[in-house]
Image: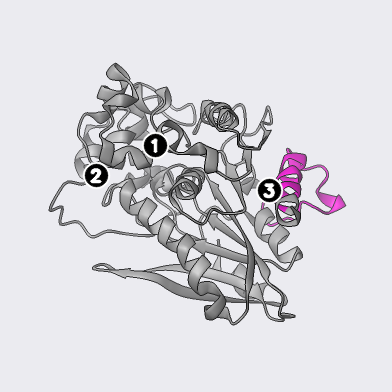
């Protein structure tokens, strides 16, 4: 999300604030909040960016808090005079998903404990959203924290990291053909103990991402079905899950797989937004999440549009989807439904 957008929001101020520090420096978040306040508690919407935990809109490999801006969500927040928070987090493969999750939890807890003092006003309900890998982190964070968010908005999230999509080799993303992954994976091996690579918490998308080797990591991990290995740092875990099921996941790594091991009954009301024809994070993730959350007694609202490829909401650009001139935008009603859900979560 471009800094210029934050700075140009009429009636709003933004700050970049470190929410934690480590051996590789500060990890920061952006806070966008109304310039004027009446002293009443203000709703906070935290949005966690995607990137397959690596970057981009896929996993935790690429991306930063300015990547793949959900303008529709920011516009909805500012129209309601809410506070919008967007954190960075450490990325795979220099770190495991444990680090990504730790950062997401710390950012969430910082908002609960310190945001009010940082901006000089009380906060009210806290809503948690995320796209793709950010959706995964939002769900996993909600499972981990004691003070739950008031609602979850999970946008085409890679929610079932132990599912067949991530443990069955042979299939690339975006419908692209598989390729020989050896050179990519040798350049970006999974992290190991005493790994001397510097952890990174942001990787802005380059102009030509198809030629960027880091972006190819996401494809390689899908083709070879290595996401569980890279997420946990455990060599061969994906194959073990494929052969033996989720019982193969060691106890210390089970917090990374909330749909399999989490206390889902405590998850707050949840909105699942996922395109049926998504070729990056397949709809199976949304279907499994809906089933398991409902079985646990969670209030779930789903919106699975038939023709909504991964990142469909980002492709709408900087548009206010609540205005009449947005009526012709593909799947705009799905975005409006998500906003209505957030509204109802604040009013409940």
* Label number found at residue 39: none
Residue placed furthest toward the left: 194
At 36% from the left edge and 25% from the top edge, which residue is drawn? 178
In reply to whether residue 160 is colored magenta, the answer given is no
- Circle nearer the viewer, 2 or 1: 1
For the residue pair 313 and 31, the one nearer the viewer reads as: 31
User: Residue 296: image x %, image y %?
Assistant: 55, 32
- Circle nearer the viewer, 1 or 3: 1
The answer to whether the residue labelled 2 contacts the one labelled 1, judged by CB atoms less than 8 Å apart, is no
At 68% from the left edge and 57% from the top edge, which residue is drawn? 318
From mark 3 to mark 2, how far is it between C-alphas? Answer: 33 Å
**Visual colour scheme:** one colour
* Label number found at residue 316: 3
User: Residue 222: image x %, image y %?
Assistant: 37, 30
Instruction: Count neighbours of disc 2 (C-alpha within 10 A) and say few if under 14, some if 14 to 19, many if 20 or more.
Output: some
User: Residue 284: image x %, image y %?
Assistant: 52, 25
Which numbered disc, 1 or 3, marks the residue that appears first in the sequence? 1
Q: Secondary structure at mark 1?
A: loop
The residue where tag 2 is placed is 188
> Would you say 4 lies left or right of 228 here?
right
Which span is picked out in magenta? 317-342
From mark 1 to mark 3, how far is it between C-alphas? Answer: 31 Å
User: Residue 87: image x %, image y %?
Assistant: 47, 62
Q: Which image quarter is the N terminus in?
A: bottom right
From mark 2 to mark 1, how far is it between C-alphas? Answer: 23 Å
Instruction: Count neighbours of disc 3 (C-alpha within 10 A) and say few if under 14, some if 14 to 19, many if 20 or more.
Output: some
Q: Is residue 230 visible?
A: no
At 68% from the left edge and 80% from the top edge, which residue is drawn? 35
Q: Residue 176 appears in which quarter of the rendering?
A: top left
The residue where tag 1 is placed is 257
At 61% from the left edge and 46% from the top edge, which residue is drawn? 153
């Amino acid at each position: 999300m471009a800094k210029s957008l934050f700075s140009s929001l009429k009636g709003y101020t933004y700050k970049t604030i470190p929410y934690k520090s480590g051996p590789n420096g500060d990890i920061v978040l952006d806070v966008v909040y109304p310039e004027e306040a009446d002293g009443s508690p203000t709703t906070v919407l935290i949005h966690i960016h995607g990137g397959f935990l690596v970057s981009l809109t896929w996993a935790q490999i690429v991306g930063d808090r300015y990547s793949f801006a959900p303008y529709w969500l920011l516009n909805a927040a500012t129209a309601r005079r809410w506070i919008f928070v967007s954190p960075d987090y450490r990325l795979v493969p220099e770190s495991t998903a444990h680090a990504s999750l730790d950062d997401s939890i710390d950012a969430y807890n910082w908002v609960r404990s310190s945001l009010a003092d940082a901006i000089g006003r009380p906060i009210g309900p806290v809503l948690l959203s995320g796209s793709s890998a950010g959706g995964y982190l939002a769900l996993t964070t909600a499972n981990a924290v004691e003070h739950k968010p008031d609602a979850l908005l999970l946008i085409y999230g890679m929610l079932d990291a132990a599912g067949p999509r991530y443990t069955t080799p042979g299939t690339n993303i975006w419908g692209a053909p598989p390729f020989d992954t050896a050179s990519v994976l040798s350049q970006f091996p999974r992290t190991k103990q005493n790994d001397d690579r510097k952890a990174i918490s942001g990787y802005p998308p380059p102009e030509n991402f198809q030629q960027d080797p880091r972006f190819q990591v996401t494809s390689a991990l899908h083709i070879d079905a290595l996401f569980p290995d890279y997420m946990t740092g455990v060599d061969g875990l994906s194959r073990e899950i494929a052969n033996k099921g989720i019982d193969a996941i060691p106890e210390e790594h089970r917090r990374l797989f909330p749909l399999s091991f989490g206390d889902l009954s405590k998850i707050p009301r949840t909105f699942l937004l996922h395109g049926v024809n998504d070729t990056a994070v397949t709809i199976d993730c949304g279907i499994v999440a809906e089933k398991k959350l409902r079985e646990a007694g969670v209030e779930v609202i789903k919106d699975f549009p038939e023709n909504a490829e991964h990142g469909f909401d980002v492709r709408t650009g900087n548009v206010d989807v609540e205005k009449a001139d947005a009526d012709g935008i593909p799947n705009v009603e799905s975005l409006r439904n998500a906003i209505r859900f957030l509204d109802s979560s604040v009013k409940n």
